[in-house]
Image (spheres, grey):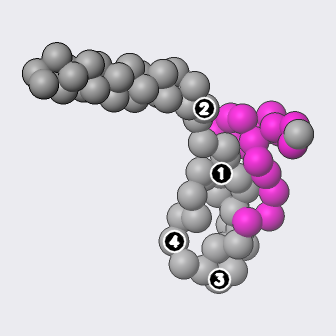
């Protein structure tokens, strides 16, 4: 029973490591404020009152677009 528990634990750890190795960074988007005429390049909406206007991008300057497959 202890050997099976160790094997199961090893499989879980291996699965987590493999999943992390395949993970990609989150894309960046260009956001525009609905209140002010300002723009921000962020991965997530900065706060309420913003709308996404362009993206996705590879970089934090919103200059290198990602090709959508």
The residues tagged by marks 1 and 4 sit, at their Cα atoms, a distance apart of: 13 Å
| Residue 55 picture location, percent across and down | 79, 51
In the picture, measured across the screen, residue 34 lies left or right of residue 25, that is right
Residue depicted at x 60% and y 32%: 24
Contact, mark 1 vs mark 4 (Cβ under 8 Å):
no
Q: Which residue is mark 1?
A: 41
The residues tagged by marks 3 and 4 sit, at their Cα atoms, a distance apart of: 12 Å
Contact, mark 3 vs mark 2 (Cβ under 8 Å):
no
In the picture, measured across the screen, residue 39 lies left or right of residue 21, that is right
Closer-to-camera residue (52/61): 52
Q: Which residue is mark 3?
A: 35
Which residues make up the magenta segment?
Answer: 52-68
Q: Nearer the viewer, mark 3 or mark 2?
A: 2
Residue depicted at x 56% and y 31%: 23
Label number found at residue 24: 2
Work out whether mark 3 precedes mark 2 in sequence or the reverse, and give the earlier one: 2
Residue depicted at x 69% and y 40%: 61
The residues tagged by marks 1 and 3 sit, at their Cα atoms, a distance apart of: 17 Å
Work out whether mark 1 precedes mark 3 in sequence or the reverse, and give the earlier one: 3
């Amino acid at each position: 029973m202890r050997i099976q528990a160790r094997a199961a634990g090893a499989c879980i750890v291996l699965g987590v490591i493999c999943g992390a190795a395949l993970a990609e960074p989150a894309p960046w988007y260009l956001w525009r404020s609905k209140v002010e005429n300002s723009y921000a390049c962020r991965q997530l909406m900065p706060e309420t009152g913003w709308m996404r206007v362009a993206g996705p991008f590879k970089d934090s300057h919103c200059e290198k677009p990602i090709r959508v497959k």
